[in-house]
Image (cartoon, rainbow, N blue to C red):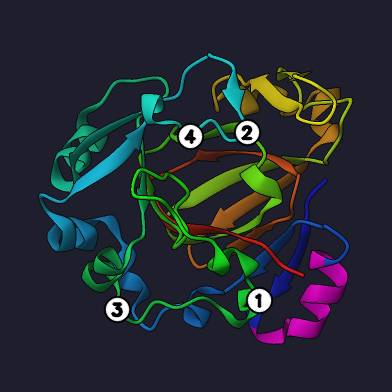
Amino acid sequence: MCVDERQMESLSLGEFRRSFESEGRPLLVKAAAPAASQQPERWHVQTLQHSLQRRPCRCHIQDDALALTSGRTKLSVIRMPFEEYVRYMDSHQDSEPLYLFQEFEEDLREAVDSSFHVPELFCEDFFLDAQETPEGFTGLAGWLLVGPASSGSRWHFDPWGTAAWNLLFEGQKLWAFFPPSEHQAPPYVEAQLLGGLSEASHFYAAPPVLTLADLIGTPAAATLRWVLQESGDLVFIPSGWWHCTVSLTQTSAYTRNYING
């Protein structure tokens, strides 16, 4: 089953809030890049390499350890200059490549695309009232995502009950969604609740992203909702939904968590 699809130019704020935010339904929004950027070409990897050069960026290591919520911990991160990461993308032989996942702070926005702004669909965001400690790791201003083919994010749901949106500027990306559930997890994911009833934490172990290909054509695939995201498309991820992504080509994107009414 595929998720619902709308064109950005015909999607009103009222319909989005009423039919997707309030109902908790994933959505693919086509031709959405102009709603966030006047210069979407500045997000292409070749241009980013010129803009960022030696800037250190976070690159995420995927592993099989049990993870808390989205699993983005300091232990899963290495840093390397952006231009070095581009060389890695061109030459790696890893089955599950490193995935660049860099906080989109103001100085990075100026270097990448000073025209970039949050689309009107997501203008209500109570997450903006949060403050991040110096050693924090929440990415309140969103994230720059860059990766080669076969890179991506293993099955996870976003932390703190946030929803999220992801705008792809270059390449193609395959998504799979699984609805929120306290008793079930996506195929091949091992999940459990640990701790007391009042402070239980959801831990899970997720398989490599390329296992999505193993699901195609099986009965398990029918339990998922699928999205093929292309350049310029935006994906809305409601709170609590499991999701997994794999880049089918080299990709660059922006993603952001938010809290709506």
Q: Which numbered marker is on residue 114?
A: 3
Q: How many marks?
A: 4
Q: Amino acid at mark 1?
A: Glu
Quadrant assignment, res 121? bottom right
- Residue tagged by mark 4? 72
Q: Quadrant of residue 96?
A: top left
Horizontal relation, residue 182 to residue 80: left or right: right
The CA span between labels 3 and 4 is 27 Å
Q: Work out how far the residue at label 4 is from the one at label 2, CA to CA, in angstroms.
A: 8 Å
Which quadrant holds the N terminus? top right
SS category of the residue bearing label 4:
loop
Q: Amino acid at mark 2?
A: Thr
Closest to the observer, 65 or 223: 65
Q: Residue at x 21, y 42 (%)?
A: 86
* Upstream in sequence: badge 3 or badge 1: 3
Where in the figure is residue 131, as x and y percent of width and height? Answer: 48, 60
Position of residue 124 in the picture relative to residue 84 (left or right): right
Disc 1: which residue: 124
The residue labelled by disc 2 is 69
Between disc 3 and disc 4, the foreground one is 4
SS class, disc 2: loop
Q: Would you say residue 129 sits in the magenta stretch?
A: no
Q: Tell me whether circle 3 and circle 1 mark residues in contact (CB < 8 Å).
A: no
Mark closer to the observer (2, 3)? 2
Give x and y (percent) for residue 200.
76, 26
Q: Earlier in the sequence, mark 3 or mark 4?
A: 4
- At label 1, counting other C-alpha atoms closer than 10 Å, the crowd grade (few under 14, some 14-19, many 20 or more) is few
Instruction: Give how far across and how far down residue 134 sits, in percent.
Output: 34, 49
Is 180 on the left or on the right of 93, as rendered?
right
The boundaries of the magenta stretch are 9-21
